[in-house]
Image (cartoon, rainbow, N blue to C red):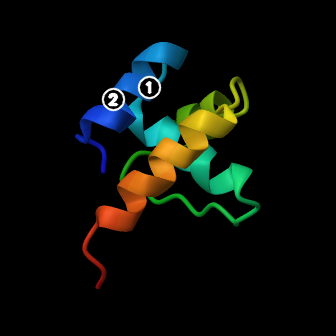
Amino acid sequence: MLSDPTVLKVAKTHNVSAAEVGMRWILQQGMTLVTASSKAQYDTEDIHGVGAFALTDAEMAKLSAVNATLPRR
């Protein structure tokens, strides 16, 4: 998902990373976000970053459509 053109376009619009877009998408759906990184600094930066912007309804719909096409485990 992090390299999907739609995700990257939304990230560029908000001047954030694709990971932050994914995390914001999760949070705006009312789901719990769990992070895991080999560097605590990355988790801290991402958590602070996702609170600095909100996705529009249109962006949420586009990201949900991307998610629907991803393979399931």
Front position in the image: 68 or 29: 68
Contact (CB < 8 A) between labels 1 and 2?
Answer: yes
Q: Is residue 63 left or right of residue 52?
A: left
Query: Mark 1 — residue?
Result: 11
Residue drawn where x is 30% and y is 51% of the image: 1
Dot 2: within a 10 Å radius of its alpha carbon, few (fewer than 14), some, or many (20 or more) residues? Answer: some
Q: Of the residues shown, which amino acid type is indicated by label 1?
A: Ala
Q: Is residue 6 left or right of residue 13?
A: left
Q: Of the residues shown, which amino acid type is indicated by label 2?
A: Leu
Residue drawn where x is 70% and y is 66% of the image: 32
Query: Mark 2 — residue?
Result: 8
User: x, y percentage for residue 16?
Assistant: 48, 22
Spot the residue most to the bottom.
Answer: 73
Q: Secondary structure at mark 2?
A: helix
Residue drawn where x is 30% and y is 64% of the image: 69
From the viewer's perspective, is residue 25 above or below residue 57? below
